[in-house]
């Protein structure tokens, strides 16, 4: 068993784990249960939780904190080797991907981004009371590093939804970090950073004519067409739709919404376009779905998108499925789902299911 010190925990997470005492509300109970909360509310049934006071309960704090750190280290260290962490490839039923490496007890609700050679992986982790952040893991030789913050990370602002260019030379991501002066003010914008053999470059905002207040969850085709989610205010209510912008003569043309068979007025988000633009996967809460949000697919036929089709029970569940992504070469499909519990994990499935839905 490998243990990490308190200093190492603070370096990665920016804080100590919160140690709480769960006190039964029911009378005539003499015992209590001590629990730990790593950035999540600590509630259990009819119990209420309160942080222990270090000066008053120093011995109890040490008693519970050390085992908690050991448990965290057990769940977040690994010795997996080879592509996809040496995991058995999935078949035609979705299974959790990289449990205790990428899929942990944190909030991972979107597909990871793989470099073209599959040796660099980034994904989004969302925790309460701190900005959303990107986490990176890399393979050197046949061994994977421990998960860590990429060198371009911004600890003060949300970074979301990473995806690589087709050639793997750039990483794109959505961020709330401040934009340079002269660019339109946005709540969230698209950024890009160069992916070099010796590390990462310096992130720069993608200066496009598609600028809106909130745009995110981008996907890029081989010819440079950008697909992204856009929040619009319609009659005082927020509505999410998918837009595209073509890359022409070195810049992006004005963005255009997809047709109303896709943008039907329901929640429509998280586009994933095939490199050759032969299909489009997105999430929606439109009527007739299996859960709160399902993944749908459209195929391009004669230059037009087919009617959206629910991707079925091999992927969707009574819970929420969100933010799909493809492996390099398109062999596997990844997505986020909370089907196994309150918080979502990353799942993967053979991408052959896409052909079966044509």
Image (tube, rainbow, N blue to C red):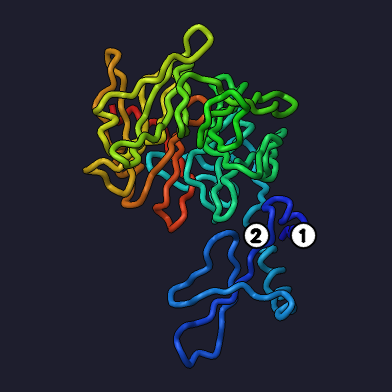
Q: CA distance from mark 1 to mark 2?
A: 11 Å
| Residue at figure coordinates x 50%, y 31% from the top left | 327
Front one among 2 and 283: 283
Image disc number at residue 134: none
Q: Label 2 belongs to which residue?
A: 72
Answer whether residue 295 is visible to the viewer in this image. Answer: no
Quarter of the image that includes the C terminus: top left
- Residue at the limit of the structure toward the bottom, as seen here: 28
Q: Are marks 1 and 2 in contact (CB under 8 Å)?
A: no
Image vertical order of residue 305 relative to residue 314, above or below = above
Q: Label 1 belongs to which residue?
A: 5
| Residue at figure coordinates x 28%, y 38% from the top left | 235
- Residue at the limit of the structure toward the top, as seen here: 249
Percent of width and height locating residue 20: 60, 72
Q: Quadrant of residue 7?
A: bottom right
Percent of width and height locating residue 68: 66, 66
Image vertical order of residue 279 relative to residue 85, above or below = above
Question: Mark 1: which secondary structure?
Answer: loop
Percent of width and height locating residue 32: 56, 83
């Amino acid at each position: 068993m490998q243990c990490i010190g308190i200093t190492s925990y603070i370096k990665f997470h920016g804080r100590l784990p919160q140690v709480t005492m769960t006190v039964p509300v029911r009378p005539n109970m003499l015992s209590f249960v001590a629990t730990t909360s790593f950035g999540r509310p600590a509630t259990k049934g009819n119990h209420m939780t309160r942080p222990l006071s270090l000066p008053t309960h120093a011995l109890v704090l040490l008693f519970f904190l050390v085992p908690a750190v050991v448990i965290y280290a057990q769940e977040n260290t690994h010795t997996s080797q080879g592509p996809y962490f040496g995991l058995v490839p999935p078949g035609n039923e979705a299974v959790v991907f990289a449990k205790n490496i990428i899929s942990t007890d944190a909030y991972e609700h979107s597909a990871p981004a793989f470099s073209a050679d599959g040796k660099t992986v980034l994904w989004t982790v969302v925790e309460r009371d701190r900005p959303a952040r990107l986490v990176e893991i890399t393979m050197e030789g046949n061994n994977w590093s421990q998960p860590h913050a990429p060198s371009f990370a911004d600890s003060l602002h949300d970074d979301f939804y990473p995806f690589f260019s087709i050639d793997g030379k750039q990483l794109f991501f959505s961020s709330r970090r401040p934009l340079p002066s002269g660019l339109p003010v946005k709540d969230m914008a698209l950024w890009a950073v160069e992916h070099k053999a010796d590390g990462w470059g310096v992130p720069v905002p993608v200066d496009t004519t598609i600028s809106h207040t909130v745009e995110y969850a981008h996907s890029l085709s081989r010819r440079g067409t950008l697909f992204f989610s856009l929040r619009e205010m319609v009659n005082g209510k927020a509505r999410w739709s998918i837009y595209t912008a073509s890359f022409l003569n070195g810049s992006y043309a004005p963005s255009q919404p997809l047709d109303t068979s896709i943008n039907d007025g329901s929640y429509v988000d998280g586009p994933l376009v095939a490199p050759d633009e032969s299909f489009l996967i997105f999430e929606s809460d439109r009527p007739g779905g299996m859960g709160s949000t399902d993944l749908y697919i459209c195929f391009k036929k004669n230059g037009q998108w087919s009617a959206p089709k629910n991707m079925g029970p091999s992927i969707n569940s009574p819970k929420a499925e969100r933010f799909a992504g493809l492996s390099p070469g398109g062999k596997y499909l990844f997505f986020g789902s909370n089907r196994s519990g309150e918080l979502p994990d990353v799942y993967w499935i053979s991408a052959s299911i896409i052909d079966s839905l044509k």
